[in-house]
Image (cartoon, grey):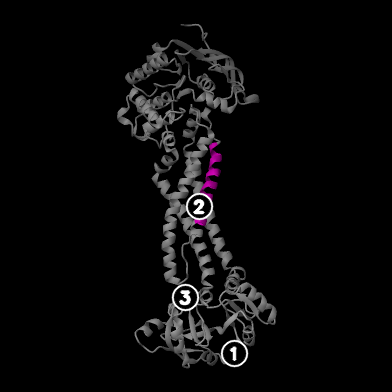
Amino acid sequence: MVLVSGLRHSYGSGSMRRQVLQDISLRVDPGEVVLLTGPSGCGKTTLLTLIGALRQVQEGSVQLFGEELRDASRSSRLNLRRRIGMIIQGHNLLRCLTAEQNVQMGADLLQGVSYRARRDRSREWLRAVGLSDHLGKLPHDLSGGQKQRVAIARALAARPQLLLADEPTASLDSRTGREVVELLKSLAKDQGCGVLMVTHDPRILDVADRLVQMEDGQLSQGAYAIE
Amino acid sequence: MLGPLWQGRRIPLAWLLLTRQPVRLLVALAGIAFAGILMFMQLGFRDGLFDASVTIHRLFDADLVLISPRSSSSVSMAGFPRRRLVQAMADPAVEGITPVHWNLLLWRNPENRATRSILTLGFEPSDPLFIDPTLQPKAKLLQDRGRVLFDERSRPEFGPVAEWFRQGCTVESEIGGKRVRVAGLVALGTSFGADGNLLTSHETYLKLLPNTPPGSSEVGLIRLRPGSNAAAARERLQRQLPDDVTVLTKDGFIAFEQNYWRTSTSIGFIFTLGAAMGFVVGCVIVYQILYSDVSDHLPEYATLMAMGYRLPTLLGVVAREGLLLATFGYLPAYAAGQGLYLLVRNATQLPVTMNTTRALTVFTMILVMCMASAVLAMRKLGDADPAEIF
């Protein structure tokens, strides 16, 4: 599903050039939950944006669903993005939309699905993350944890085949954090969806099928190794 | 047909972006409405002016009109030999003629003695002058010397003539030091050139203006036999008559007057410029609103792009915001335009009315204004980098 090999990435140019990723190789299979940990600033987020087809690959290879991302055009990267669910730390909900409408922005990406079906789907996911009482609330009126759960529901409503999550439990208490992670895991198992999660949260490490450590732009353990 | 569309609908993002910020929306709509009102007023004044300049011209019962080539407009009509009008009678198509004196004279307000120039038409009371048949019986009143018919739609600065007359008073005043008595009222209307109108007999007119060369007229009305071709008759007469007269059709006479105001004065230009300024002001306001809207929501737009929304889809959101602003800004502008036109009509007696052409023109301008601003604001969307959202 995701196959990264020999990936290098750097920012800036000339003497300001700074290497962020060095020779990364990583693999995420369908139905697998991979946790990526490491100190901040080690390049985890850059790796996520590269796998998420948000950034142009410079050197090495990233394959998503069998398609090579390097030298991929803007529009083919965009099409790939529709198959990826992203859960972002800053959650970036649309302030002018209610929780339900935010989730439906994700569901609206599905082609050929009727309005009613997309709406029902949105409500279903909001119920799954425990927000069925807050459908009509604006992000402004939701707590940080609730917003995070809306963002998760939004990512899931688009029926993703791969889920990229950046600290999904950071603003949740341990019980809801646990629930959310269990939810992601069951999704991975039921729908054969791959999950790559960046986290610092030691409470959820046990849900991982595989743990990957990252330091100074390098994976300290062979990504293929543990099982 | 509608079913699939209805089922295919998406979250109305443009609508929600606008309506969830009611204060900003109100400011935007107020700005657009203001620009629209400005355009309505300026264009209304301009068209009203061109219309008003021919209030009297339209009333004449004539197919062809003779004027002097030295006449430039209703405010400076020169005389031509009345013989030419009689000569025109020789043409087989001509049925009747009416020589008309036309000049601006000083009318003394009977209430406060102030003088003001008023358009005075002198004609033979037995001759047809206006299309309106109700003038004919009143014209008989002019057969006595020193009698005038006063236009009740004249500006109030001429004095409460119509009121006094209706109360049964004998209203007398002075024109050029000569006493005249109001014998009746007519309803004609003011124009930019004339604040009021007065009708009088040929004889009285010569008494008021003793220096008028005998045998001259400012306007000659020619009525053709029914079924005659006015344009052909005009050509024929213009060829036959010496070049000390110009032959115009009635429409040509109207165009002659409007053309003067359009080209020989700065008025048309001024009002068009005013409308253009309204347009520019509107552009600036809408651009500000849309630009700050895009800037404020840049991270959200970036998120949508990261989720897989295409740039054209997001451009469409901004375009739809522009469209909504145009529509909802236009409605109050239209309503206010109607109200202000009524106000202007009452205050100035100018025929400023809403017409379909102008309503559509202003809507098109507002639409162009909003869409152009939307296109400019869209450039900001290019700054939305989905890689920056993490």
Q: Secondary structure at mark 2?
A: helix
Residue on which disc 1 sits: B212
Chain to which the residue tagged by mark 2 belongs = B
User: Residue A54, image x and y in percent?
Assistant: 54, 25
Q: Considering the image in quadrants, where does the N terminus of chain B appear?
A: top left
Please indicate whether residue B352 sits to the left or right of residue A169 in the image: right
Q: Earlier in the sequence, mark 2 or mark 1?
A: 1
Residue on which disc 2 sits: B366
Please indicate whether residue B266 sits to the left or right of residue A126 in the image: right
The residue range painted magenta reads B360-381
Chain to which the residue tagged by mark 1 belongs = B
Q: Secondary structure at mark 1?
A: loop
Residue B189: which numbered mark, if any? 3
Q: Nearer the viewer, mark 2 or mark 1?
A: 1
The type of residue carrying mark 1 is: Thr
User: Residue B29, image x and y in percent?
Assistant: 44, 50
Give the overall secondary structure of the magenta segment.
helix
Crowding around mark 3 (Cα neighbors within 10 Å: few <14, some 14 to 19, many 20+) is many
* Same subunit: marks 3 and 1: yes
What is the distance, in whole Å, between disc 3 and disc 2 at their CAs? Answer: 33 Å
Q: Nearer the viewer, mark 3 or mark 2?
A: 3
